[in-house]
Image (cartoon, rainbow, N blue to C red):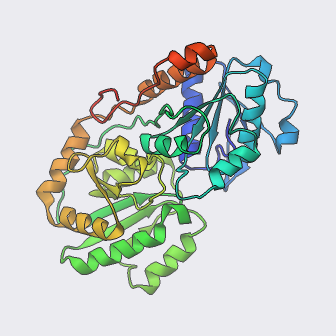
Amino acid sequence: MADSYQPVLGGIETHVATLASRQAARGDAVTVLTTTPAAADGRRWDDSGPVTVRRARSVADASPFDFAAYDLVHAHVSVLSPFTSRMAALAARRGVPTVVTVHSMWNGLGPVAALAASLADLRRAPVLWTAVSREAAHQLARHLPGPPSVPVLPNAVDVPPRDLHVRGAGPVRLVSTMRIARRKRPLPLLTVFEALRRSTAVDVQLTIVGDGPLRRRAEQRVRHRGLADAVTVTGRLEPAEVLHHLAGADVYVAPARLESFGLAALEARCVGLPVVGHAASGMSEFVSDGVEGWLVASDAAMVDRLRLLVEDEPLRHRVSEHNRTHPSSLTWRSALEDNDRAYALAAAPPAALARAPRPVVRGRGGESR
């Protein structure tokens, strides 16, 4: 269950659609309930296939939905998810085991996120709260009246590493994949890139893969700042085309601070790119300094780290080869196992739930945490 779903392209939409299809492929009967129409965001989604998709216009339109016909409800929410929050609370109060996964950072939003959940009657509903990263879980726990620990159900990708990346002559290529919207910070990314160009003699280029409400403004900034020869904004691309751009790049840049996980950055890490992002994000699930990339405390520090990577080709190669030859443990196989453990917890009697160990997130090298 999610307010936003395919055909909208984004982290939560991609994760929910892939989770549903993977569960259906192993034999589960999966229904997705959403308010997103089949034609949205300039695309149309084919609802035929093993996953049943129910598209409602509102809570009132979905109120006849028979939750009693299902063994479990898994609700995916962001900061504001009015439809999913209300429907999840309704399912839980009707006695259906309900897992709620938060795909956003709740700190820095004041009372907005907790107030939204309270207004939807979800905050005190008998649900199992989970989050997509440890950082998101820590922030979520501070806003909940229940137990202080929140299980982590991380996102996952299964993408192959690129072939050995041998650079020829030419610029160092940075890439960033995002919905070009304020929360992803595309304009500060351009400021970082401009500062990087001023601070190094190395020729460097940036490709921004994606589309969104700030695309026109970003492209205007590129032209006005004289960056048209160095910055490309591709617009929305299909997944195979995104992977093609990642495979041809040298460094991945993730400028967002309120990044609860960083699905696009995980894809880049799995392809074999060094990743540079912000330390206060959920990317700490799969990036540690000097191993898979670097997580920095500020935009100024991001400029410094990018300059080091741009100027030090052996360092770039070392991190790239580590990422290319050491597969991430955040695979769909492990994600399905983590979700199954959460489902078992949600379905357990309250006394058993209090004694049960929490689901764990697998660390960068495959260890449990």
- Comparing 254 with 28, the one in front is 254
Residue at 20% x, 50% y is 290
Task: Report how many numbered discs are placed on residues in the image.
Answer: 0
Q: Position of residue 221 (x, y in %)?
A: 47, 80
Residue at 14% x, 62% y is 312
Q: Position of residue 13 (x, y in %)?
A: 59, 44
Residue 302, image quadrant: bottom left
Residue, far left: 314
Residue 128, image quadrant: top right
Q: In the picture shown, does residue 24 fall above or below 170? A: above
Question: Image quadrant for the C terminus?
Answer: top left
Residue at 14% x, 59% y is 313
- Comparing 249 with 100, the one in front is 100
Question: Image quadrant for the N terminus?
Answer: top right
Q: Position of residue 10 (x, y in %)?
A: 56, 50
In the drawing, does residue 246 fall left or right of residue 202?
A: right
In the drawing, does residue 212 fall left or right of residue 308?
A: right
- Comparing 209 with 142, the one in front is 142
Residue at 24% x, 68% y is 304
Q: In the picture shown, does residue 98 fall above or below 133? A: above
One can see residue 38 in this view: no
Residue 306, image quadrant: bottom left
Q: Position of residue 21 (x, y in %)?
A: 58, 29
Q: In the picture shown, does residue 343 fall above or below 192? A: above
One can see residue 60 in this view: yes
In the drawing, does residue 18 fall left or right of residue 299?
A: right
